[in-house]
Amino acid sequence: SVGSLISMVAVFMFILIIWEAFAAERPILFSEGLSSSLEWLHFTPPADHSYDETPMVSNY
């Protein structure tokens, strides 16, 4: 049927996209060491004193 044909084409395209992503070996644009956002430095769930004190922001 038409629905199964569309699904099969979509799965085939998905497999091609994944294969191309692994085969291209592009460099990583965003690394864990480059995060400058303060929200990534907090633990989950945040500690009790997280929002009672102003966080110290420093330039690396």
Image (cartoon, rainbow, N blue to C red):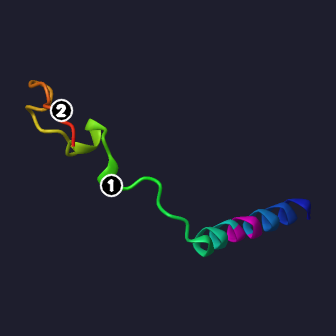
Q: Which residues are magenta?
A: 12-16
**Residue wearing tag 2:** 57
As displayed, is residue 56 above or below residue 4? above
Question: How much space separates mark 2 and mark 1, taking CA atoms?
Answer: 18 Å
Whole-percent x, y for residue 26 in the image: 55, 66
As displayed, is residue 7 above or below residue 50? below
Left or right: 45 as drawn, with respect to 31 = left
Residue drawn at x 85%, y 59% as measured from the top left: 3
Residue drawn at x 33%, y 55% as measured from the top left: 32
Whole-percent x, y for residue 14 in the image: 69, 65
15 in the magenta segment: yes
Amino acid on which the number 1 mark rests in the picture: Glu
Left or right: 1 as drawn, with respect to 49 = right
How many numbered marks appear? 2
Q: Quadrant of the C terminus?
A: top left
Task: Classify mark 1: residues with Cα within 10 Å, few (<14), some (14-19) or many (20+).
Answer: few
**Residue wearing tag 1:** 32
Q: Quadrant of residue 7?
A: bottom right
User: If you read the primary sequence from the N terminus, does the residue marked by circle 2 or circle 1 appear first?
Assistant: 1
Pick the front one: 34 or 53? 34
